Image (tube, rainbow, N blue to C red):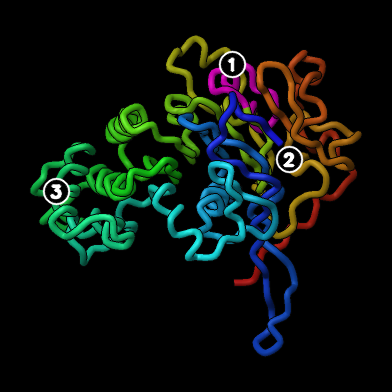
Amino acid sequence: MAESAGDGALVTVENVRVWFPIKSGIFLDRHIGDIKAVDDVSLEIERGETLGLVGESGCGKSTLGRAILRLYEPTAGRVLFDGQDITHLGESELRPLRRRMQMIFQDPFASLNPRHSVGRIVSEPLRVHRVASRRESGGRVRELLEVVGLPADAAGRYPHEFSGGQRQRIGLARALALNPDFIVCDEPVSALDVSIQAQIVNLLESLQRDFELTYLFIAHDLAVVRHISDRIAVMYLGKIVEVSPAEELYENPLHPYTISLLSAVPIPDPEVERERETILLVGDLPSPANPPPACRFHTRCPFVQETRCRDVEPGLRKLEGGHWVACHWAEDIKAGAIQPHEVEAVFETQAAPAVSEPPV
């Protein structure tokens, strides 16, 4: 299991799997396979830190975030919140913990009920958990709107009257209503303009300092993740392939997938940009219904080797500097002993693994 940066983990994920069954037939409803969205993931989130979670669309980032909050039921493994195993708690037992765990959703347009006023949306957690009277909740709503940078009169308006950035602030105010300890930020800035992204990220950092929050920040924008994260976990096809302190990951990426991702990030220096080489990945992301055997990245890896990569699954192992990586050849790649090449050059006589798509 990947260790955190220090002691006192608030959230611990142990060997969690989230598989969605594929069924066929109208009457028999046969179980013919599984979508392995999250497959044997372990990590810890330190109290007060921001753990960035990055990867391609469809790699299981959002599913993992929702499984931690028990919005999805884990198929296997354990989720511990503040030392308590919440994996199999019933709804009545889980309800008090819901106040300490909240979520900011990706789409600021779809996550707010268009028929409810902003005041009703932000006060809904207070009503559901019965922690404030109607008069008290009105004052709390005005306070929350001020905290996230919205005027108090916004409470009487409706979501369609606000811009995307303002709607995301409304969602943030709702998440803060119950004074949570932990917030899952599910790509909270991906649907916003660049200038608005910076405002929301700065607001999240400010709120973290003021309210001692812990974040799981899910995103695919590596620049945003670097700015806000203390540590970063890289996910590929349902598995964590690298975990590292943020600056260490950007200066010294070890997994071939991370190296490829960072090589595609533009550098605002024309001379440096012209000199460096972009590593292009071969093919598309395989289906989570039928992932490649052994190392799941070997069908696209520019550093793939004939031995071990397609026969032995690499475990997540710890290297120096709190750096965890799931690659057999990380040290050789770092030392320059293995250079990137065409994947077909290594497996030119072997067919690609079968990829099946789940039925619609």
Q: Residue at x 89, y 36 (%)?
A: 308
Q: Is residue 135 left or right of residue 178?
A: left
Q: Residue furthest bottom?
A: 27
Q: Is residue 301 left or right of residue 348?
A: left
* Amino acid type of the residue that numbered disc 2 sits on in the rendered structure: Phe
* Amino acid type of the residue that numbered disc 3 sits on in the rendered structure: Gly
Nearest the camera: 5 or 192? 5
- Cα gap from disc 3 to disc 1, whole angstroms: 47 Å
Q: Position of residue 40 (x, y in %)?
A: 71, 48
Q: Residue at x 19, y 43 (%)?
A: 145
- Cα gap from disc 1 to disc 2, whole angstroms: 22 Å
Q: Which residue is mark 3?
A: 139
Q: Is 256 one of the magenta-colored residues?
A: yes
Residue 345's label in the rendered image is none
Q: Looking at the figure, which quarter contains the C terminus?
A: bottom right
Q: Position of residue 299 (x, y in %)?
A: 76, 42
Q: Is residue 326 above or below residue 275?
A: below
- Cα gap from disc 2 to disc 3, whole angstroms: 52 Å
* Amino acid type of the residue that numbered disc 1 sits on in the rendered structure: Glu
Nearest the camera: 217 or 309? 217
First along the sequence among labels 1 and 2: 1
Quarter-of-image position of residue 150: top left
Q: Residue at x 89, y 34 (%)?
A: 306
Circle count: 3
Q: Position of residue 212 (x, y in %)?
A: 38, 31
Q: Which residues are the magenta region?
A: 244-259
Q: Is residue 194 visible?
A: no
Q: Residue furthest left?
A: 153
Q: Is residue 268 left or right of residue 290?
A: left
Q: Which residue is mark 1?
A: 251
Q: Which residue is mark 2?
A: 297
